[in-house]
Image (tube, rainbow, N blue to C red):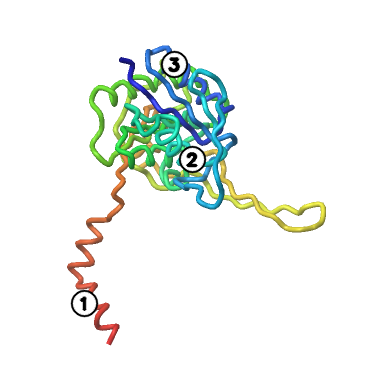
Amino acid sequence: MKPTILLTNDDGYQSPGIHAIREKLIEEGFKVITITPDRNMSGTSHSLTFTRPLKIQKLSEDFYYIVDGTPADCVHLGINIVLEGKKPDILVSGINTGPNIGNDVFYSGTVGAAREGCLFGIPSIALSVSSSKNPDFKTVAEISIPIIKAVELYSLPKGTFLNVNIPIIPKESIKGYLLTKQGRSAYKEEIVKYLSPSKEEYYWIGGEEELTEECQPGTDYTAVKEGYVSITPIRLDLTDYEGLEFLDRENFIGKLRELQK
């Protein structure tokens, strides 16, 4: 039986990234169920839509659906409605147009969808490219396949998913795959003010394309900058255990009680 992959993204159903990885997965013999937002939902992180109803539209007969919601909504509806509660073997989110490196993991809808898949107990992978400037998605899809096959064969630890970033350089120039840790910053942040024709102020939150973190050894940022495919395991458990030990050692709760008196 063919392994089933639930495929989603945050760039919407028209993104060339999702079409490239979808075609390659089908070529490799996977059964691919595709369910994506009906528009670009970048920056929606792990949000779910609770304030209005959602609609699913069947785009074609070959298991392709669109949803008027977030990437995490797509995962929820893909598993509970399209797959009728049956879990796929793997969840793949991407290929995202641009990197999800460092602090991006907190904002990214691509990463949010993979995190949602992980919450369902599905081995999940977020795929991104290092730049939005003319990526060769066909090549990126080819580079992604060994990672997906490795997860199919060996799975992942419970509560862990993979955040993968692939450099946009010729395939023969890629030095290999590296396990990395999450870096810090990703973009130089920028807020631009504009005036509407009626002289009302509005703002556009964004950032420069160029990554700005210092090259710390072992980070996702450094790996991509040096020509490696970065594979970062991300845990669902966000507890800072060192912080927990520190606060316990410093009698933080005792100090709180003193302040209550």
User: Where is residue 220, by image quadrant?
Assistant: top left
How many numbered discs?
3
The residue labelled by disc 2 is 211
Q: Amino acid at mark 2?
A: Leu
- The answer to whether residue 188 is above or below residue 232 is below
Q: Position of residue 232 (x, y in %)?
A: 33, 36
Of marks 1 and 3, which one's residue comes earlier in the chain?
A: 3
Q: Which mark is residue 98?
A: none
Q: Residue furthest bottom?
A: 261
CA gap, disc 2 to disc 1? 43 Å
Comparing labels 3 and 2, the label whose residue is closer to the camera: 3
The image quadrant where one finds the N terminus is top left
Q: Amino acid at mark 1?
A: Gly
User: Where is residue 57, by image quadrant?
Assistant: top right
Asked if residue 29 lies left or right of residue 54, the reply is left
Q: Which mark is residue 24?
A: 3
Asked if residue 261 lies left or right of residue 225, the reply is left
User: Where is residue 82, by image quadrant?
Assistant: top left
